[in-house]
Amino acid sequence: MTLFDHIGELRRRIIFILVILVIGMVIGLILANPVYQFLLDQEPVKGMKFYAFSLWDGIGMYMKFALVIALIFALPATAFQLWAFVRPALGRKEQRAALMFVPFVLIMFLIGLAFSYYVVFPMAFNFTTDVAKHLNLEENYGIIQYFTFLFNIVIPISLLFELPIVIMFLTQLRIVNPKRLKKMRRLAYFLLIIVGIVVTPPDFISDSLVAVPLILLYEVSVMLSSVVYGKQLKAAQAWEEEYGDK
């Protein structure tokens, strides 16, 4: 394929992803109200009263839910389209191995969603409300402000849970390898700790409860990369033994 053929192929893949995103947003608008009611019935906000400070707040809430739900649909679709785009450059075994990553994109995102919502978010919410009570402030929360606060914590952490899948996929494409990942370990730890500090209250326990799982995710990524890279080396060695002298 020429460069323009590759660009045309990439454009078609991107258009397909955008179509899935739009369909996901339509589904998200339909599901927004039941999901909204479910979240308001959960701790730590069960029984709390929220307010609209603008005529657009109700619409803004629906759009936020639509985007998040659309993201859930778009992630596996994006992973599949990425696999389809690079498939011609892969062997048959590599194609099957890379395709197996696609369903795990959604699984890891949902795991990250559960961890961030049930572990990280309550810590951040309780910390902010405790500060407000300490300052004798009357707590009247706007619906947009609340869900913006929620999604700003939940979505980045959920996306970080895709790290093992991304690393395995890049290793399969021979873009990264375990040696390079080990050299980047200090920088990766530093960035993940910064993320843990940013999305949690400023205390050591909360920061550790987020940073430690993220660091473990990186180490799992290195381990999985080593597995993929080891298989590649064995395959290359077997090919060399069979065809190298011919």
Image: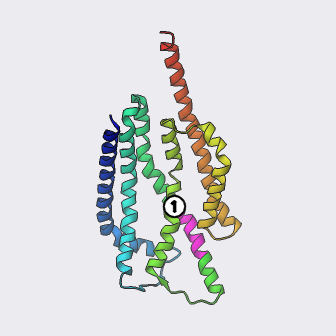
Q: Position of residue 118 (x, y in %)?
A: 53, 65
Can the viewer see residue 41?
no
Residue tagged 1: 156
The image quadrant that residue 211 belongs to is bottom right
- Which residue is painted at 52% across and 14% down in the image? 241
- Percent coordinates x, y for residue 152 in the rendering: 51, 68
> What residue sits 48% from the left and 62% below the top?
155
Above or below 241: residue 15 = below
Element carrying mark 1: helix
Q: Main secondary structure of the magenta part?
A: helix
Indicate the quadrant where residue 121 lies. bottom right
Within the magenta stretch, is there residue 229? Answer: no
Can residue 239 be seen in this snapshot?
Answer: yes
Q: Residues within 10 Å of mark 1 (few under 14, many from 20)?
A: some
Q: Residue furthest right?
A: 204
Magenta extent:
115-126
For the point 40% across and 47% down, the residue is 79
Q: Residue at x 39, y 41 (%)?
A: 83
* In the depicted structure, whether residue 169 falls above or below residue 120: above
- Coordinates of residue 88 in the picture (x, y in percent): 36, 33
Point out the image quarter for the N terminus.
top left
Q: From this view, report whether residue 175 is shown above or below residue 13.
A: above
User: x, y percentage for residue 232?
Assistant: 52, 29
45 sits left or right of 199 in the view:
left
| Quadrant of res 4 | top left
